[in-house]
Image (cartoon, helix red, strand yellow):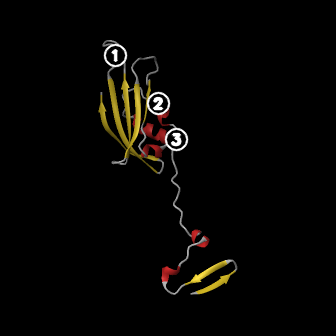
Amino acid sequence: MKHFAFGLTFIIMTSCGQADIQSGPQADNLKVEEPNIKSETFDDEIITLLYEKLDSGFDIDFKQNHLESILKNLDILSLKEGEEFEKEMLFEDYKCDCLDKIKIYYDKADDRFILWVYEEFYETDLDWCPETSYSYSFQIVNHKITDLKLDFMAG
């Protein structure tokens, strides 16, 4: 084994490959670090894109601000790690005892986000709250909503 010194750096030349490589401060500097996983959130751009794709399919009083109320700044990575978010609200612009809900979660098996929209509307003649529900799935690729599908509708 030959040692050559150039300034403060030592170069060790070996004759038989990897067995003579030494670990130390110089070797630690050569480690490749894994990239940090950047956590993304549902921001105004993603929410607007999602609402625009959803809006054409609704026969209910569902507005973009309803979607914003659950998704705004919601951590995408936390959904992918199994968290679910659900919120009760009123889609109507008047006081009503029939509550609406929005729920979002991530389906790992299908690699898709699931958005469930549930609406009750008061029917005065029946004194009852009939319901309508929609289930959509989509992916987020490069900060864009892709492959939006209506998976289920009842009402």
Q: Say which quadrant the N terminus sits in.
A: bottom right
User: Residue at 52% across / 41% down in the picture?
Assistant: 43
User: Residue at 48% across / 48% down in the picture?
Assistant: 143
- Determine whether 90 is above or below 69 in the image: above
User: Residue at 48% across / 37% down in the picture?
Assistant: 71
Going by the numbered disc 1, the residue's amino acid type is: Glu
Residue 115: percent from the left, percent from the top?
39, 37
Going by the numbered disc 3, the residue's amino acid type is: Asp
Check disc 3 and report the residue beneath it.
43
The circle on residue 141 is: none
C-alpha distance separating marks 1 and 2: 22 Å
Looking at marks 1 and 2 on the same chain, the residue that comes earlier in the sequence is marked by 2
Q: 11 left or right of 52?
A: right
The circle on residue 123 is: 1
Going by the numbered disc 2, the residue's amino acid type is: His
- Number of numbered labels in the structure image: 3
User: Residue at 42% across / 46% down in the picture?
Assistant: 80
C-alpha distance separating marks 1 and 3: 35 Å
Residue 9: percent from the left, percent from the top?
66, 77
Q: Which one is nearer the viewer's eye here, 33 or 112?
A: 33
Q: 33 left or right of 83?
A: right
C-alpha distance separating marks 3 and 2: 14 Å
Check disc 2 and report the residue beneath it.
66
For label 2, the SS is helix
Quadrant of the image occupied by residue 121: top left
Quadrant of the image occupied by residue 53: top left
